[in-house]
Amino acid sequence: MMVTDVSGDLTIRVIEYGDEMMLAHNQEPHIRHTCDFQVSREVLSGKSPVFKLLLMSNFAEAKKDTVTLKGDKVTTMDIWFRILHAVHLENVQSTPLEEMWPMVVACDKYNLDIRDLNGWFADWYEKKDRTQQTPRELLYPCWIFDHAKGFAAATKSLAYDCVGHVTESNPTKHKELHLPSRVIRKPRCGLFTSYILSNSIHAEQVNAAKGRLRTVLHRELFKPNECLLLARCSCKETTLFGYEKALYRIDAWPLERVAQRHSITAILDCLDNFAFEPPKEACIDFCQQNYKEAVEVTQALTRSYFDGLCLDCMDSSKPKTGNTDLDYWRHNSLRERQLVRGCRFIHRQPTWYFSFMGGKEERDHYREKKSTTPTGGRDRVGVIPGEAAHEA
C-alpha cells in the first residue's frame, strides 16, 4: 500500500500490464505490476473531471472503497497522485526520461491539467544527469512541460551539432506524442493534450535555423573572396587560390559539400586550425588582408547567432484572433522588443524570428486570398514574415 494521503478515504488499485500482445480477444495481457494507493476521493474529483464522474456519480465505483485502474503505469500514477495531493517528491532525478511520455498519456486519459507537472519537470531537469539523454529526446518533454531553458538548449544544440535533417526522438511506444511540424499545432497549456497521428515529424523551425547558420558561415567566409574578385592586381589569383586552399586543407571548404558531412560546430572547430598568409609580394590594397582575423570573426558571429527557440516568443506569435487577416497584420505590427520583453531568458533577434509560430498555412492562405481578388496580387501582399529576415 502506497500512502499518498494518510487521511485518504479511497484505495486506487493500479494494474500495470506488460507489452506482450494478447493471446486471444477475451484474454488480458500479462500483469507486470499491481499497487494500491491510499488517496483522497475529494482531491481526485476536484482535479479530474474523469475521476469526478467515476467517483461522484451513479457509477458503481462511487460506492466502493477500492477502485481499480487497468493499463496504467504504477510509477506514472504514483507521481500523478503525489502531485495532485501536493505531496513533496523525493529523488525526483531518479525518474527516467522515458517516464515523461506515459505522464502525458495519463494526463489525456484522466483529463488532468498538464501544467500541474511543470514545476515537477523543472525540478527534474535541474537535478537530472542529462548526459545520457540526447537533445532529440528532450525536445518533446521540454516543450510539453513548458521548460523554456531546456527547450532553448535542446533546439540550439540540434541546430549547431546535428548532421543532416533535424528530427526528434521518442524512446517509448507512444508514437502519437510528438512535436507538430512547426512546434505549434498542439496546445501546451490546457486540461489535456490532443494527439497528432504521425510516427515521425521534423522540427521545421530548427532546420530553418540550422540552414541560416550555414548561410551566415558561408557569407562571412566568402567576404575575403569578394574583395579579391573585385581586385585588378596581378596577385589576386594566387592569393584567392591560397585562401581557399587553406580552408580546403582543414576540411572547411567548399561549404556546400562539407556541411553534408559535418555539423556547424564541427566546421567551426575545424576553423581553429586555419592558417594562411598571402605572398610577401602581394599588393597591400587588396591581397594583404588579415585572413586569420576574418575567420575568427566568422567563428564568433556564427557561434553567437542562434540561442535556440523561445517558448515565450512562440506563444506570443501564435494566432490569437482566429481571423487570418487580423493575425497576419498583428504580427507585422509587432516589434521585436514587444515580443522578447517577457521572455524567460535573454536572446538575440534570430531566436525571435525563428520562434515565429503564426503558421505557414496562415501566411500562404493570406497570399492566395489576395492574389485571387481583382485589386490584389502577390505584389500587393508585401513582405511576408519569414522572407525578409533571410535577407538580413
Image (cartoon, grey):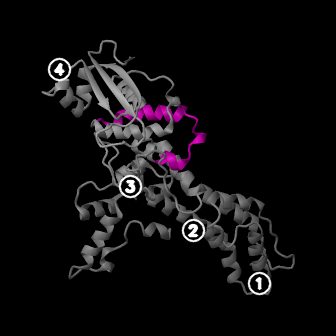
**In the image, what residue type sits under mark 4?**
Lys
Task: Give yes or no for residue 137 being in the magenta stretch.
Answer: yes
Q: Which mark is residue 180?
A: 3
Front-lying residue, 268 or 300: 268
**For the residue labelled by badge 4, is the local secondary structure a helix, a strand or a loop?**
helix
Front-lying residue, 81 or 382: 81
Residue bearing mark 2? 215
Q: CA distance from mark 1 to mark 3?
A: 50 Å
Kindly identify the residue that appears in the image at 77 percent across and 74 percent down.
245
Kindly identify the residue that appears in the image at 49 percent across and 71 percent down.
391
Foreground label between 4 and 1: 4
| Tags 2 and 4 touching, CB below 8 Å | no
The stretch of residues the image draws in magenta is 112-139
Report the residue that reaches farthest toward the left. Answer: 58
Q: Which mark is residue 63?
A: 4
Q: Would you place residue 99 above or below residue 14 in this image?
A: below
| Tags 3 and 4 touching, CB below 8 Å | no
User: Left of 295 or right of it: where is 54?
Assistant: left
- Locate residue 216, reporting x and y percent: 58, 66
Sequence-wise first label, 4 or 1: 4
Residue 252: image quadrant is bottom right
Task: Give yes or no for residue 388 being in the magenta stretch.
Answer: no
Sequence-wise first label, 2 or 3: 3
Foreground label between 2 and 3: 3
- Locate residue 268, reporting x and y percent: 67, 60
